[in-house]
Amino acid sequence: MTDFTATRAMFDLPEGVIYLDGNSLGPLPHAVPKRVEQTIRDEWGQMLITGWNKAGWMDLPARVGDRVGRLIGAPAGSVVMGDTLSIKVYQALASALELRLDRRVILSDTGNFPSDLYMADGLCRTLGPDYQLKTVAPADVENSIDESVAVLMITEVDYRTGRKHDMPRLIKRAHEAGALVVWDLAHSAGAIPVDLHGADTDFAVGCSYKYLNSGPGGPAFIYVAPRLADKVRPALSGWLGHEAPFAFDLDYRPGSGIDRMRVGTPSILQLAALDAALDVWEGVDMADLRARSLELQNTFITRVEAKCPDLMLASPREEAQRGSQVSFRHEHGYAIIQALIAEGVIGDFRAPDILRFGFTPLYLSLQDVALAADRLCAIMADGSWNWPEFHHRAKVT
């Protein structure tokens, strides 16, 4: 059994704060500052440019990628770190489309994260008027997969509601129709059990600054199924995806396997932070994590619904259909969240009316969750959320 008391002790959590926003930005693990300082002072400071070889900087994207891969059911050598999630979405989509040149449709759903849709739409515009991004309601995805679809692009867990798609089922349906699948695991990696290899997915991408706790702007990852890794052509032909980067050839030759999905110079300080943050996961069983997450979610839902009738559950009631977050709806959701933050409970808001709460067993207890629910309901009961200062919109919501 995973000892979640031990993992909680590995985080630097502000005193008096209950943090229910790890699904947006994970908190700071104790090991990260020391590791980043070591990278700055001992490696960059003392080794200078020789750190690329002496400190193994050049190998960090692949080595850390393997550590992330363990959490998402990816075999060694199939995940690499680098760039941003939007860049990785573009890479995966472009490579998948090129493997299906007889088709022109990218299928996604209206619950997908807007940036993914923006990248897909931009790629279609670049490729020409014959290419199309088609979006349907999340519940209609399976029935919309037909022989016109080249790529199914889906975020496994809806960023607003926490609704979880059935990954194996959609992959099976897509493959039967001759389509490839790109999964966005931004709200899955480190949140729920994922088995990319077992589900026979084609591509997957994700960020590391949410449940993996790499810090703001932490590097993204990309997975390519081993059966496709030497077939795909990277649309973003960066120098570190070259077969021999330091030969400085003028002609691009893709590297072998997942290495060809590297683009530019890796962010070493952020990779060092992620590498240290991943130490928290040593000894964590994903099945234990999932069971505890559902226990936390159910406790929160039960208490909120019992005392806050004005908040409407936006997440699926069925456990198997939820990721690791719970959302409620209210027309003044932004103000309510601001009032709750003022009471020491940090959640967040997503337009137009979603109050969003992430449940991360690595550092949250049942007592934390019960107290958070009680504070939310107290704010609703006394109307303090309606104070003017809570209605002022900041740049980041």
Image (cartoon, grey):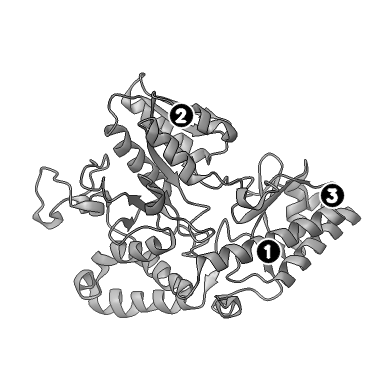
**Residue type at the position of mark 2:** Ile
Residue in the picture at 43% in, 41% down: 171
For mark 2, does the 10 Å Cα neighbourhood hold few (<14), some (14 to 19), or many (20 or more) residues?
Answer: many
Name which of mark 3 and mark 2 comes first in the sequence: 2
Location of residue 384 by image quarter? bottom right
Q: Which residue is mark 3?
A: 386
Label 3 and label 2: CA atoms lie apart by 45 Å
- Confirm whether residue 396 shows in the render: no
Location of residue 276 by image quarter? bottom left
Q: Position of residue 251 (x, y in %)?
A: 10, 42
**Residue type at the position of mark 1:** Glu
- Confirm whether residue 60 shows in the render: yes
Q: Which residue is mark 2?
A: 145
Q: Secondary structure at mark 1?
A: helix
- Using the image, determine if residue 329 lies above or below residue 246: above
For mark 1, does the 10 Å Cα neighbourhood hold few (<14), some (14 to 19), or many (20 or more) residues?
Answer: some
Q: Which residue is mark 1?
A: 295
Residue in the picture at 15% in, 55% down: 245
Quick one: which residue is furthest to the top in this view?
129
Label 2 and label 1: CA atoms lie apart by 34 Å
Q: Position of residue 120 (x, y in %)?
A: 42, 34
Q: Position of residue 196 (x, y in %)?
A: 40, 52
Name which of mark 2 and mark 1 comes first in the sequence: 2
The answer to whether residue 67 is left or right of residue 370 is left
Residue in the picture at 45% in, 57% down: 217
Q: Secondary structure at mark 2?
A: loop
Looking at the rendered image, the quarter that the N terminus falls into is: bottom right
